[in-house]
Image (tube, rainbow, N blue to C red):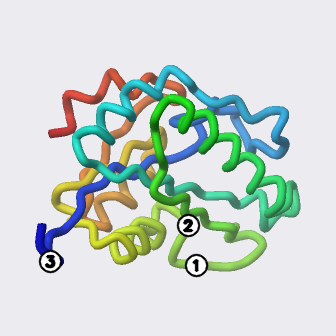
Amino acid sequence: MNDSAKNKAVFLDRDGVLNKEMGDYVCRIEDFEVLEYNIKALKELQDKGYLLIVATNQGGLAKGWYTEDELAKMHEKLRSIYKDGGVEFTDIFYCPHHPDFTGDCDCRKPKPGLLLRGIKKYNIDPALSYFIGDRERDVIAGTAAGVKGILINSDQPISEVLDLID
């Protein structure tokens, strides 16, 4: 493979896709419930050569509802449980901002900043990539980054949309 070859990726929203949707911010590690039924589907995507990259809004940080340390614990739990199933996340990008507290930013979905960072950092071809999310803002962010958005219901098994991914 030459250096100019581009990677393909599946970007993933976090809450409602990789862990249980709580209806509001997940503020404590005790409430962070990983959706283990998605391990098999994500392993299939990984085995097809897709990088798996998380892109999540974490406005609760700006609101002071939880700390960077608590968020890091949640992401460590996420990585650990999926890794036990053979799934490795290439990276986890998060937006710590909230418009009511920190003003405007380019990384809070529906803006594409998180995806654009991943595309640049990992030499990803957006045209070969997807973004699975449970909110319209995820699809909008994906489209703005040149990635095909796939909208699922909160906590819907990813296996039900695998046929939408080449």
Q: Is residue 146 left or right of residue 97?
A: left
- In the image, which disc is placed on residue 2? none
Residue 158, how many percent across, how many down? Answer: 39, 28
What residue did someone put label 1 on? 105
What residue did someone put label 3 on? 4
Residue at screen point 67% across, 58% down: 58
Q: Earlier in the sequence, mark 3 or mark 1?
A: 3
Q: Quadrant of the C terminus?
A: top left
- The crowding category of the residue bearing disc 3, from other C-alpha atoms within 10 Å (few below 14, some 14 to 19, many at least 20), is few
Amino acid carrying label 1: it is: Cys
Residue 19, how many percent across, how many down? Answer: 61, 34
Q: Kindly check if marks 2 and 3 are in contact, taking CB atoms under 8 A apart as contact.
A: no
Helix, strand or loop status at disc 3: loop
Residue 30, how many percent across, how many down? Answer: 84, 33
Q: Give the Cα distance between marks 2 and 1.
A: 6 Å
Q: Is residue 77 left or right of residue 112?
A: right
- Using the image as rendered, state which of residue 161 and residue 103 is in the foreground: 161
Helix, strand or loop status at disc 1: loop
What residue did someone put label 2 on? 108
Residue at screen point 70% across, 41% down: 77
- The crowding category of the residue bearing disc 1, from other C-alpha atoms within 10 Å (few below 14, some 14 to 19, many at least 20), is some
